[in-house]
Amino acid sequence: MKKMMLPLLLSAALLLSGCSPILNREYSVLQPHSFTYYEGNKSNVLRAESYQDVVNDLLVLIGSGAKEGSIWLYAGEEPLDAAETAENACREVKEETPLGAYAVDYLSYTVDDTPRNYTEIRLTVGYRRSAEQVSSMVHATSIAALYDLLSAAVSNGADELVVQVSYFDQQEQEVEDIVSRVQKEKQPGAGEKWPVYFYPNGRNAGIIEIILKK
């Protein structure tokens, strides 16, 4: 399995990657408020000329915590059916990207195909995480930092630790071992294991969530 470059959506640049049964690629690098993706000075209206642009635009909206937004889909090198593109992009973002799998409850859309030089896709985003939870994620290059981060979180009385990693290569068991080690050291004799969740999944995780208190 190839390594994954994962989203840093809350920083100045957005670097995203994912793995899909159909799509096996790295996502584009985006600059928020770039003229390439935003329509003029409208912060919730983005432009797209390809399917990948639509995926990236969705991730930009989610990364900014937007509950609504629009994508103006222009004709690119290959013509796209706007409804089909929106459906597939919403599914990919929700199920196959770390941030989407972690933060998003649902994505819905309508398509306005009024004759003009673009088709408007209007989007609504429902979240399963608060803006505070998303913004408090810790970013690390790899799971090598997890032991120290988790130990500090426990010492500080945190309820949970959410870490976004830039590199993850089928290391689910390594993560579980680190969590068990810290729990034994910090809470010897504790009953239940701290739950650990991987987004979008344990093989291709980009976000690791550890629940310390129920």
Image: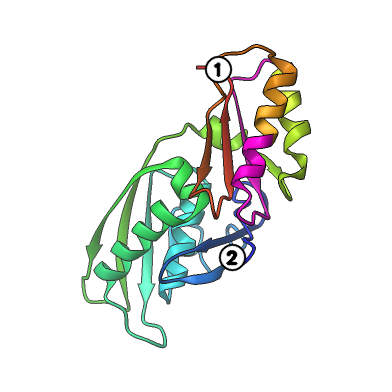
Q: Where does residue 162 sit, x and y in percent of width and height?
A: 60, 35
Question: Can you tell which mark lies on residue 136?
Answer: none
Indicate the secondary structure of the residue bearing disc 1.
Answer: loop
Q: Quadrant of the N terminus?
A: bottom right
Indicate the secondary structure of the residue bearing disc 2.
Answer: loop
* 120 with respect to 149 (left or right): left
Task: Kindly identify the residue that appears in the image at 56 percent across and 50 percent down.
Answer: 205
Q: Amino acid at mark 2?
A: Met
Q: Where does residue 31 sit, x and y in percent of width and height?
A: 62, 61
Q: Where does residue 97 sit, x and y in percent of width and height?
A: 48, 55
For marks 1 and 2 on the same chain, the one whose residue lies earlier in the sequence: 2
Location of mark 1 (residue): 213
Q: Which span is picked out in magenta?
A: 157-177
* 16 with respect to 66 (left or right): right
Task: Kindly identify the residue that appears in the image at 71 percent across and 45 percent down.
Answer: 143
Q: Is residue 156 visible?
A: no
Q: Amino acid at mark 1?
A: Lys
Question: Can you tell which mark lies on residue 1?
Answer: 2
The residue closer to the viewer here, 116 or 131, is 131
Q: Where does residue 160 sit, x and y in percent of width and height?
A: 59, 25
Q: Is residue 141 magenta?
A: no
